[in-house]
Amino acid sequence: MHILVDADACPVVIRDILYRAAQKRGIKLTLFANQSFQIPASPVISLYQVAKGPDMADHEIAARVAEGDLVVTADIPLASEVLEKGALVVTPRGERYTENNIRQRLQMRDFMETMRASGEHGGGPPPLNQTDRKAFADQLDRLLSRALRPR
């Protein structure tokens, strides 16, 4: 398993949880971003800096993801694409995207985009809180434990 992170929009506190999990379990973790930032010195953690531009990290993740990998992203179109490749997807808030819920999420995203374009709705999601951090950490632990369980 390889953990791939859409890091431009991933909160620092969530990246910290990922760093600890990757080091503890020896799982390869790659963060994709269009800007550089500090990461822990570790043989399992790397930062892949993509060219500046919309969706560049998403394209790189989609090109590199493989079946059984875990992708951390809130980007619904990216989630849909990596699910098609047999990867697992979790948001920084701990929500799993699955084959069963991704179509509904895409429809809601398109609806909200239409509403924003018409000026009817503004703003983004609320700031990440302690409950969100715990939900992410718990979901990550469940996914990694299941994936790394001897068969």
Image: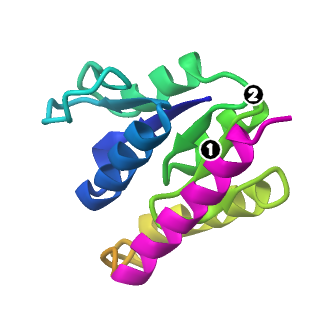
Is residue 10 visible to us here? no
Question: On the image, which quarter does residue 111 sit in?
Answer: bottom right
- Position above or below: 4 against 79: above
Q: Position of residue 86 (x, y in %)?
A: 77, 32
| Whole-number angstrom distance, CA of label 1 to CA of label 2 | 10 Å
What label sits on residue 79 in the rendered view? 1
Q: Tell me the residue at 75%/42% (across/down).
A: 149
Q: Position of residue 128 (x, y in %)?
A: 34, 74
Q: Horizontal placement of 37 versus 46: left or right?
A: left
Q: Tell me the residue at 24%/55% (across/down).
A: 12
Q: Crowding near pointer 1: few (<14 within 10 Å), some, many (20+)?
A: many
Q: Position of residue 15 (x, y in %)?
A: 32, 50
Q: Horizontal placement of 127 versus 73: left or right?
A: left
Image quarter in which the C terminus is found: top right
Q: What segment is highlighted magenta in the picture?
A: 130-151
Marker count (numbered)? 2
Q: Secondary structure at mark 1?
A: helix
The reply to whether the magenta stretch includes residue 39 is no
Q: Main secondary structure of the magenta part?
A: helix
What label sits on residue 85 in the rendered view? 2
> Which amino acid type is shown beneath numbered disc 2?
Lys
Of 7 and 54, nearer the camera is 7
Q: Tell me the residue at 23%/25% (across/down).
A: 52
> Which amino acid type is shown beneath numbered disc 1?
Ala
**Could you tell which of marks 1 and 2 lies nearer the N-terminus?**
1
Image quarter in which the N terminus is found: top right
- Position above or below: 92 against 2: below
